[in-house]
Image: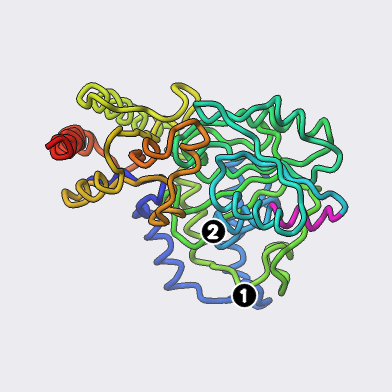
Amino acid sequence: MVYLDNNATTPLDPRVADRMILFIKEHFGNPSSLYPLGQQVKGLMNEAREQVAIALGARRQEIIFTGSGTEADNLAILGMMEARPEKREFITSSIEHPAVLKTACYLENHNYLVHYLPVDQYGLIDLNFLNSVISPETALVSVMLANNEIGTIQPLEEVTKIAHRQGVPVHTDAVQAFGKIEVNVDRLGIDLLSLSAHKVYGPKGVGALYVRKGTDIKPFIHGGHQEFGLRPGTENTAGIVGFGEAARILMNQGRKDRERIEKLAGRLKAGLENSIKEIRFNGHPEKRIQSTLNYAFPGLAAGAILLALAVREIYVSTGSACSEGSGDVSPVLLAIGLNPELAASALRLSLGRFNTEQDIDRALIEVPEIINGLRENSNQ
């Protein structure tokens, strides 16, 4: 198997699995219980909270664990809007993850004015447009740090400067950026930031929201006191401990991982572009996550390529895993100027910690062979 869909999910790191198995075997207490059995679990959760916070340059008390990155995005946006009922405007970009774009649609259906920042051919947002639409009526700006389909990295530091001059808080979906580039909340200047464990070799079913100290935010789920009252409900304790371990590993070896992965991705990129005649790279040539490669193959259908590769146990995707299979053409690719037919020919290849030189060797044989073979068949 050659797994090149790490943006959809990463394999669980064996060290994370071992940590979770040990925890599950030894700790079943409810962290809300006051006796030692529960307090031991609470202590291990706080240790995990500390590990995630350190990876972000944040404080432990600023990390709220959620059930997913999608939930973290929803809590950030809906929680901030709820805290500012007098402000009825929201700003986001046109190429956000569905977790943000669907929430923006929800706000529009509830009489909020939503401004969508346009992007250029590389997927970079228009800062002039942001300057023109932000106002005292804006409750929140939400712009993702790195795009999940094309990898383009947004100028978040500039976004926060513009927003904060108007007294407007900023949220960023950093699910695809965390672990792939340095993410420091103070350097970015953001007020809220979303993460997901399964994008950094942790378990599925657990995410996190960074909330800067002093930020006024309301829960949209109501119940108990867990997670500082912002995310009630008994916590996914094993998942949280796994997330903490994934963050610890990231801090210890993340830089070395990135250097190796980026070299592999550079080799894959050069090899594909040299061996396939009609191929279009989508995304910024420099300001992007290097491990994310998005290509359009004119004249072909991405689904046919994906299935042909899957038969040979090479796994890629046609875009966001959260919209995979919907049959819709990627709104990200349309937003950067591709026509629907060209957008429908695009594949995303994303590399991760467990990819090897042998994976790249095989991909550079199989992918061009399949692309060229499909084109020959379509011309007959």
Q: Position of residue 283 (x, y in %)?
A: 45, 29
Q: What label does residue 36 carry, if any?
A: 1
User: Would you place residue 149 above or below residue 42 in this image?
Assistant: above
Secondary structure category for the residue under label 2: loop
For label 2, the residue is 68
User: Would you place residue 63 above or below residue 157 in this image?
Assistant: below
Chain part drawn in magenta? 77-85
Q: CA distance from mark 1 to mark 2?
A: 29 Å
Question: Is the image coloured rainbow, by chain, by secondary structure, or in one colour?
Answer: rainbow
Label 1 or label 2, whichever comes before in sequence order: 1
Residue 257 seen: no
Residue at the extreme left: 380
Q: Is residue 42 left or right of residue 167?
A: left
Quadrant where the image shows the C terminus: top left
Q: Is residue 68 left or right of residue 345?
A: right
Secondary structure category for the residue under label 1: helix
Q: Position of residue 224 (x, y in %)?
A: 71, 73
Which residue is at 41% across, 45% downward? 319
* Mark 1 Cα shell of 10 Å, populated few (<14), some (14-19), many (≥20): few
Q: Looking at the image, how many numbered discs can be counted on the residues?
A: 2
Q: Main secondary structure of the magenta part?
A: helix
Q: Is residue 79 magenta?
A: yes
User: Label 2 sits on what residue type?
Assistant: Ser
Q: Is residue 213 magenta?
A: no
Which residue is at 69% across, 68% downward? 221
Q: Is residue 102 left or right of residue 318?
A: right
